[in-house]
Amino acid sequence: MKKIENLRDLFIEQGREFYGSTYQEERALHSMEKQAGNPDLKKLIAQEITLTRDQRKRLESAFSRINAGFEIESDPCCESLISQTREIVDRASEPDVRDAAIINGIQKLNHLKISSLGTMAAFANQIGEHDTAQAFHDVLEEEWEIDHKLSRLAERNVNRKAARELIV
Ligand SMILES: [Fe+2]
């Protein structure tokens, strides 16, 4: 494996991992879209799939601007979150509880992305790649926005339905 000798190397390494995670996320979202029962949740997942593809295209052009090239690296943290979510969702026998588990899983994935996007933007700014920094910053804002939409849907709708059986 190539040595990481400076901040640019580190930025590119982490950027590749992030880029790879967009493929992993998209695949996971497709299967969760199929398993979701709530129509609003299905709609939000479909929106997030489109958004993830669009983010990937923007990151591709940002990276080609700085001649970083792309080898796709998959993100092991992302993979383990996805398989953990898949297992929980498969075990949820009630459709509303399953929807709550799906939202939980997607939010964990989004938070994982959010945790590195700010750093990626800061690295890019530090090495003088301000347009690339802006691209990462935009993705960060979009992830927060979708996260809020998912929280609203969970709190106002899905979680309440999932808890119905418990209320006597
Ligand atoms: Fe996402």
Image (spheres, helix red, strand yellow):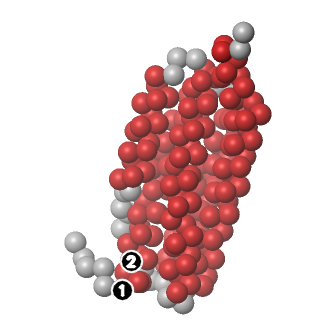
Residue designated by label 2: 10
Residue designated by label 1: 6
Left or right, 81 with reference to 149: left
Residue 82, disc: none
Whether label 2 lies within 8 Å of ligand 1 gets the answer no
Q: What is the residue that sits farthest to the right in this orientation? A: 156
- Residue name at image x 67 percent, y 57 percent: 144
- Residue name at image x 56 percent, y 43 percent: 106
- Residue name at image x 38 percent, y 45 percent: 80
Which quadrant would the C terminus be assigned to in this image? top right
- Residue name at image x 55 percent, y 67 percent: 117
> At label 1, which amino acid type do we have?
Asn
Q: Rate crowding at label 2 as few (under 14), some (14 to 19) or many (20 or more) other CA atoms within 10 Å.
A: some
Rendered image quadrant of residue 159 = top right
CA distance for labels 2 and 1: 6 Å
In the image, residue 146 lies at what x, y percent? 68, 51
> At label 2, which amino acid type do we have?
Leu
Q: Is residue 63 above or below residue 76?
A: below
